[in-house]
Amino acid sequence: MTIIEASGLTKTYKSKTGPVHALAGLDLTVPRGTVKAILGPNGAGKTTVVKILTTLIRPDAGTAIVDGINVLDDPKAVRSIIGVSGQYAAVDENLTGFENLEMVGRLYHLGGAASRRRAQELIDLFELTAAGNRPVKGFSGGMRRRIDLAGALVFNPKILFLDEPTTGLDPRSRMALWGVINKLVDDGTTVLLTTQYLEEADQLADSIAVIDDGRVIAEGTSDELKAQIGGHRVVIALVDAADGAAAREVLARYGAGEPQVSSDGRGVDVAVTDGPPALQHVLADLRSAGIELHDAGMRRPTLDDVFLKLTGHKADKAATDNEDEKMEKVK
Amino acid sequence: MTATATRPAPTQPTWNPLSLWYSDGWTTTKRNLIKIKRTPDMLVFAVIQPIMFVLLFSQVYAGAIAVQGTDYVQFLMAGIFAQTVVFGSTFSGAAMAQDLKDGIIDRFRSLPMSSSAVLIGRTNGDLVLNTISMIIMMCTGFLVGWRVNSSMGEFFAGVGLLLLFSYAFSWVMALLGMSVRSPEVINNASFIILFPITFISNAFVPIETLPDPLRIFAELNPVSALVQAARELFGNEGSAPVPDVWTLQNPVATVLIGVVVLLVVFVPLCIRKFAQISSR
């Protein structure tokens, strides 16, 4: 049943300021035919996991089995059953979109005719028909991204790895990609994707692994994770920051956890289990307490909320220490 | 149309490793040929620079540098050929660094292709560029009075030797490109290697005029052997005595040994390096 099984993966990069532990004993299993999302902030180790599972880098310790093949023993066998789209569009600037995809097809050894046919199908699928015969050099970021994603689909892979697949895509392309992914899953493809957005994991994944500092800190379905942090958050913006303490008290009454106050003292929010009634109660109580509001509403939990709950720190704390920098330090 | 309208067949089971290797090498070579066609600045470098060198050296230095038994233009051309094809190898270094920067190396490394194919395609691309440069230089040379005074066979042997050496040298630069990782740095780094080995040689001046330490370097420099071999094969060597060192007395053998040594050392190093690199 399990198609990806990684255990105890560690990877440390050298840097000028000392070793950076990209992965610190990460375990991960993905059942066959499902979509698994790895959710985490920049620098959590998402890209490193994908690179190890796709044979691009070797872990310092731990094992990784992909469809029964040990990635360290037989990387080439792994490569013949996977499709990969990395975080940065891996396309040849001087080739056209079509030529890029045809080249990938030939390198999967599909043969010339099948490679050309598949390239044209994917160009049409990703709505690049008009631009498909121009060099990628002149493409926008989103168009490059789509060519790269198409490259991962040239050969119908058993397992598809997508590292932050929708970064840089406009909403329309994002929806199109989600559609493609769902269709592939219907046909039995297993998908492992990384994302910074809970919403995306929510839409696509059967199960989510939340990672931080190179470890899985929570795992489950999107509902299970959200239950841990409450379904919605009630958010209010005060006219006067002096009302902060009183407002906090009101929110605590109906919230599922401790209310959070923003740094300027005017924004207060709290997780709630049942959104609309909680919001109505909060508004009524604030009104009778004579507290004036700029704004009030509900929002769905974000990655930041998940993180705050699970780790006690915000997801963006690592933003300056992101994986790009880590990778550049590798010799 | 759906993502799965056709299910491409898996890797052709009938293909043997050699035909896979050949097919992958050809696919990546085509990629580099398209790049040459679509990157005008690269073609300009490959075409204009050799013309400039031939004209500059033949017109500016011809009067000042005396060569025994022949005129300077005859003496010069083999040197310019050698210098240009050795400089041409920087394309491989810059291209490998650029591929790393662009991330396409990760795409190649995640495909079930031959592990040497990207490098083979790259060095083949250099070979094509160098061949174009050679043809342009020869035409320019003829215009300024250069003549081949040998048989057809010797002429082609000379051209072949120059291209063979440049091909082997492309692998050195490819390794440098993968190690340096930055297309900007590679251009500077490669000139630190290329200037001494092309200028401290017999390419532009007879080496007996050099001060002792430079003369010894020039005598043992493989580029000197390459230039000497080309000069002899084109019949441009004049009547000056060849320095009494084995490498210059037997230049063709020296170049062939050099090519084998470079390939035996750098091809495996490049393939090993390629298997470990990943963009960003």
Image (cartoon, rainbow, N blue to C red):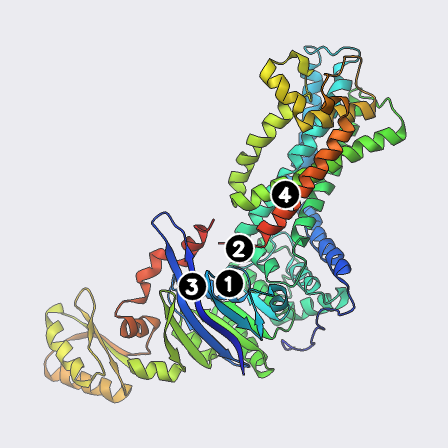
Q: Which chain carries label 1?
A: A
Tell whether label 4 touches label 3 (CB within 8 Å): no
Q: Is residue B215 above or below residue A100?
A: above
Q: What element carries label 2?
A: loop
Q: In this view, does B216 lie above or below A253?
A: above
Kindly identify which numbered label has been placed on residue A10. 3
- Quickly name the residue at label 1: A51
Distance CA(mark 4)–CA(mark 1):
26 Å
Q: Is mark 4 on a helix, strand or loop?
A: helix
Distance CA(mark 3)–CA(mark 4):
34 Å
Task: Give the mark toward the camera: 3 or 4.
Answer: 3
User: Marks 4 and 1: same chain?
Assistant: no
Distance CA(mark 4)–CA(mark 2):
17 Å
Q: Mark 4 lies on which chain?
A: B
Q: Is residue B71 above or below residue B127?
A: above
Q: Nearer the viewer, residue A292 or A152?
A: A152
Residue B226: x and y, percent? 73, 28
Tell whether label 2 touches label 1 (CB within 8 Å): yes
- Quickly name the residue at label 4: B92
Q: Which amino acid does label 3 sit on?
A: Thr
Q: Mark 3 lies on which chain?
A: A
**Residue at the (36%, 47%) spot, across then down:** A16
- Number of residues whose C-alpha sits closer than 10 Å to that of mark 1, classed few (under 14), some (14–19) or many (20 or more): many
**B218 to the left or right of A199:** right
